[in-house]
Amino acid sequence: MSFLLPCPNCGERSVYEFRFGGEIKERPSPDAPDDAWPRYSYATANVAGVQQEWWYHTLGCRQWFVAQRNTLTNEVLETALPGAAP
C-alpha cells in the first residue's frame, strides 16, 4: 500500500523513499530484569489506530524522524525530528 509521508526536512514524499524503523516504545531501565530486553527488542503492540513510529528517509536527507500515523488508514498526523517529537 502506498501513501505519502511528510519528511520534516524534505516535505511530502512517497513512502517508498523511507525505511520503517518500528513503533516507539519505552526502553527498559538499566536495572531491568534480563527478560525485559527480548520483549523490548521483538514484541510489538501492533496498534490498530494511532501510534508513534520511527522512520528513516533513505532516498532523501538520510535522517531519522518520528511519525504519528493511523495504522488503519495510513493517514500521517504529524512528523517531527527526535528532539522535537510530539
Image: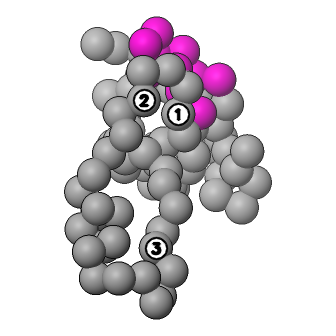
Is residue 71 in the magenta section? yes
Residue at (24%, 68%) from the top-left corner?
38
Looking at the image, which is closer to me, 64 or 30? 30
Look at the numbered disc 2 and give the secondary structure of its residue.
Answer: loop
Residue 37 against residue 13 in the figure, above or below = below
Q: Mark on residue 28? A: 3
Q: Residue furthest bottom?
A: 31
Q: Quadrant of the N terminus?
A: top left
| Mark 2–mark 1 distance (CA, rounded to whole Å) | 7 Å
Please state which amino acid type lies under the numbered disc 3.
Pro
Q: Which residue is located at x 64 percent, y 58 percent? A: 82
What residue does disc 2 label? 47
Task: Specify few, some or many for label 3: CA neighbours under 10 Å numbering under 14, 14-19, or 20 or more.
Answer: few
Nearer the camera: disc 3 or disc 1:
3
**Circle nearer the N terminus (2, 3):** 3
Which image quadrant is residue 20 in?
A: top left
Say if residue 7 shows up in the picture.
Answer: no
Does the magenta run of residues contain 63? no
Three-letter residue code for mark 2: Val
Residue 74 in view: yes
Q: Which residues are magenta?
A: 68-77
Residue 42 against residue 59 in the figure, above or below:
below
| Residue 51 - label | 1
- The answer to which of marks 3 and 1 sits earlier in the sequence is 3
Contact? badges 2 and 3 (CB < 8 Å): no
Residue 73 appears left or right of 21: right
Q: Quadrant of the C terminus?
A: top right
Residue type for callout 1: Gln
